[in-house]
Amino acid sequence: MPRTKGDHEARRRDVSEAVWRVLAAHGFGGLTLRAVAAELGATTGLLTHYFPAKRDLVAHALDLLAERTAARPRRPATPGLAAVRAALLDILPLTADAIASNRIWVSSWDTALADPALSDDYARKYARGRARLTDLIAAAQDLGELPPGDPARLAAGAQSFTLGLVVQALFDPATFPPPRQVELLDDYLASLTPPP
């Protein structure tokens, strides 16, 4: 019986889920055709139909990571400092899903740094994140909730602080559990706000 397009798409979804589980458990360092095949309960030969080379597997994993990050639910917030806070909270590893996603992102940095095309892509992704944060900060400044100044500079600082906190929380979750991360973020934001 010939395979249908639906069969192919269902199999591709299964493969994507297996890739995600390998990434969550082992990071990019453990992402191999053999590991994904074992997770899927299939042969590496089947996987080479989808990913002829390791580079194709890595590219798919990065696309999958970007898709899942974009589809992740975001905290609702009114414009102003609350929206800045919500956007930064959405980055932090505060839930099991956010921990898994952040582990994968951080483990992907080495892979991206070793490949100029991926490195450029990551630089663009982080620049887009700073641009969105810049807009949120500018709105908070317009409302008087943040002091005047260059919103892009504040966005760069906030992004850098938050990504640094992500790394610390991943390496030392006992010292940086979710409530502590939120407390540190709130302390950071309070340091930016003008005195009453």
Image (tube, rainbow, N blue to C red):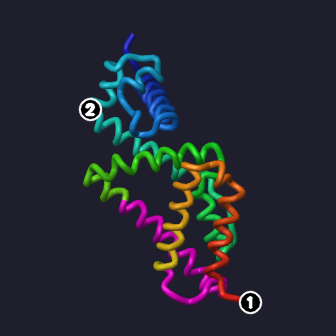
The verdict on residue 158 being magenta is no
Residue drawn at (31%, 56%) of the image:
119
Residue 160: image x %, image y %? Answer: 49, 67
Residue 10: image x %, image y %? Answer: 47, 27
Query: Along the polypeptide, which appears first: circle 2 or circle 1?
Result: 2
- Magenta: main secondary structure equals helix
Amino acid type assigned to the residue bearing label 1 in the image: Pro
Secondary-structure class at tag 1: loop
Residue drawn at (45%, 39%) of the image:
27
- Rendered image quadrant of residue 179: bottom right
- Rendered image quadrant of residue 9: top left
Residue 53: image x %, image y %? Answer: 26, 32
Secondary-structure class at tag 2: loop
Is residue 41 placed above or below 169 in the rendered structure?
above
- Give me the disc on residue 53: 2
Q: CA distance from mark 2 to mark 1?
A: 59 Å
Within-10-Å neighbours for mark 2: few <14, some 14–19, many 20+: few
- Name the residue carrying label 1: 196
Q: Is residue 99 left or right of residue 18?
A: right
Judge by depth and name the residue closer to the eye, 160 or 1.
160
Question: Pointers 2 and 1 in contact (CB under 8 A)?
Answer: no
The residue range painted magenta reads: 123-151
